[in-house]
Image: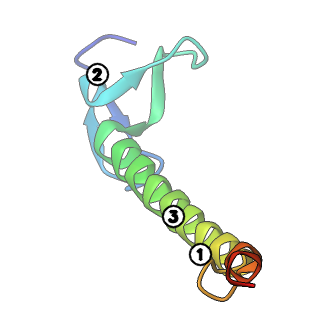
Amino acid sequence: MVQSAAKLCASCGTEKSAMEFLPTSFAPDGFTNTCKACTFAHSERDRRERDARRCEADARKQARKPSLATAPETKSKRASS
């Protein structure tokens, strides 16, 4: 594909110049089928969703751990006896 040729974004549906698409060796024309703006927005959304899932998993993991404040103090009982 010639650099100045127009290409249709598969995500937003707008026609943009080929320079507004990321290069790839997998496509016959040498560019991705989604524009840079849509690709970066998709990546940002995925990153935020992944971070949210990690926070939820960490919270569940912390909830399963026994708290140090509620754990019995066996050493201090032995020392005071």
Give the class, few, some or many, for how many residues have Cα within 10 Å of label 3's Cα (few <14, many ≥20). few
The Cα atoms of the two marked residues, 3 and 1, are separated by: 15 Å
On the image, the x and y values in percent for residue 23 come to 41, 17
- Where is mark 1, residue-wise? 59
Question: In the rendered image, which quarter is residue 71 located in?
Answer: bottom right
Q: What number is the disc on residue 5?
A: 2
- Where is mark 3, residue-wise? 49
The quarter of the picture where the N terminus appears is: top left
The residue positioned 57% from the left and 20% from the top of the image is 27
Question: In the rendered image, which quarter is residue 28 located in?
Answer: top right
The quarter of the picture where the C terminus appears is: bottom right
The residue positioned 43% from the left and 60% from the top of the image is 48
Q: SS class of the residue under badge 3? A: helix
On the image, the x and y values in percent for residue 24 come to 50, 17
Viewer-side residue, 43 vs 13 = 43
State which mark lies toward you, 1 or 2.
1
Q: Amino acid at mark 2?
A: Ala
Snapshot colouring = rainbow
Quick one: which residue is furthest to the bottom in this view? 70
- Residue 10, compared with residue 27, is above or below; it is below
- Residue 29, compared with residue 80, is above or below; it is above
Q: Amino acid at mark 3?
A: Glu
The residue positioned 68% from the left and 83% from the top of the image is 80
Task: Confirm or deny contact between disc 3 and disc 1 (CB under 8 A).
Answer: no
